[in-house]
Amino acid sequence: MQLDKDSILAANGSLHNHEADFNHLAEKLSRSHTDVEALVKKIADFQVAVPSWALGAGGTRFGRFSFHGEPATLEQKIADVGILHALTQTAGAVSLHIPWDVPTDYAAVKQIADQNGIVFDAINSNTFQDQPGAKLSYKHGSLANTDEAIRAQAVEHNHEVVRIGEKLGSKSLTVWLADGTSFPGQRSFQKALAQTEKSCKEIYAGMPDDWSLLIEYKPYEPNFYSTVIMDWGTSFMLANACGERAYTLVDLGHHLPNSNIEQVVATLMAKGKLGGFHFNDSKYGDDDLTVGSIKPYALFLIFNELVYGMEHNPQNPDLAWMIDASHNVKDPLEDLIQSLEAIQEAYAKALLVDQKALAAAQLNHDVVQCQEILQGAYRTDVRPLLERARLSRGGALDPLGAYRTLRVREGLIGERGKHTVATGL
Ligand code: LRH
Ligand code: MN
Ligand code: MN
């Protein structure tokens, strides 16, 4: 199923209310000398990758309830990303997880991606599960394993993932390790870290010169006493040990409670070492909930630092943006539409922060004014700007509304049947 521009246009209906809302906001913003056109263009240019494993219903360790019309093949998953992109115009990339989504027919996969205007962003390796037919097990770790042969198998898997990514046009590899321990004394922290560094360097050495290595961290889960790459500092250290094209990847769910993620972002960008970002939201741990559903103000504060970094840190590369959420009770496509909207909203609000006024208030130690400036931007209803950004590219005025009006899920069920199961988490 592919959504064409004409049906989206028809679903948009009258733009009368949008025009009125947009003009009202534009007039208000021009009073503070905001270049509204430039703002809309920045929002429209912001593209986020959708992970191939998020298009089906996710599960928890207590069960999985599949969703009707789930994509059963990689081609169908890319078609789903195409639907998201057609509606939102902000999901122009897909991020694959190997071995969950190894292409069987590269030409067909590339063709369907091209047809839908989708590119292949960072590709993810997986050494947290045993792979079908693998000789050795990762039960006691992969890149950090005490056994050299297991480490070599894990390094080789990463090289294989890069070779797959090269055929599709990806330019970066994301490594996330489950390696760690569940009980005190289970393993030497120092030796595990040293083995991980050695393995990461081997992965890095085998990558093409125009590829980046993105190293993701996480404090716990699936191991519950320690994780080898537990925090941004460890990831940063490993990235520095590997070389120039190795960076840290921040996943919003991978922090201990109350961590100041915006400060982590600022620190990494100042050092030119923030390479990738996984969006989700959480109440307790790595909950992988819809972006912006629990802590939208925290997301705004993080975006405020991202925007500052993108404007002031030329030493930092362009970021690989990805949604890393899981959908247990909602239609995955509706959930992703909500996440994409929340990301754009936080980004747009961060773009509204008057950086000059903020810097002046900071110099004057005017703490009250600093807060007013941030919250003034946060309280602005930027949705007419998002609508205008989508419309400028032929997207939907209201992506969720159009998804329902156009009966997309019903169409997918008609094509694929009710009882399909997607690979992934
Ligand atoms: C680990 C993680 C990592 C994996 C994905 C499936 O919690 O965030 O990015 O690749 O989930
Ligand atoms: Mn992640
Ligand atoms: Mn995670």
Image (spheres, rainbow, N blue to C red):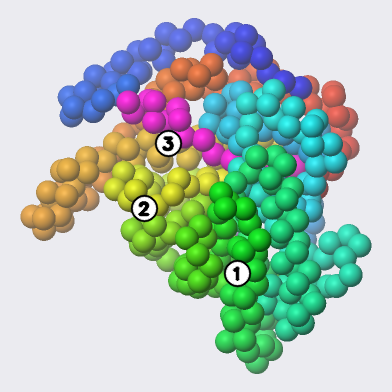
Task: Specify which label sits upstream in the sequence, 2 or 1.
Answer: 1
Label 3 Cα neighbours within 10 Å, binned few <14 / some 14-19 / many ≥20: many
N-terminal-most mark, 1 or 3: 1
User: Is residue 47 on the magenta stretch?
Assistant: yes
> Which residue sits furthest right?
133
Of tags 2 and 3, the one toward the viewer is 2
Q: Nearer the viewer, mark 1 or mark 3?
A: 1
**Where residue 190 appears, x then y in whole percent?**
57, 87
Residue farthest toward the front in the current orientation of the protein: 209
**SS class of the residue under badge 3?**
helix
Mark 1 → mark 3, Cα distance in angstroms: 38 Å
Q: Quick check: 320 above or below 270?
A: above
Disc 2 residue type (three-letter): Gln
Q: Residue at x 18, y 27 (%)?
A: 33
Assess mark 3: CB under 8 A from ligand 2?
A: no
Residue at position x 80%, y 77% in the image: 149
Mark nearer the N terminus (2 vs 3): 2
- Asked if 23 appears above or below 153 in the picture, the reply is above
242 with respect to 29 (left or right):
right
Mark 1 = which residue?
A: 201
Quarter residue 106 falls in: top right
Mark 2 sits on what residue? 315
The single residue placed furthest to the left in the displayed view is: 364
Which residues are drawn in magenta? 38-57
Q: Residue at x 68, y 18 (%)?
A: 3
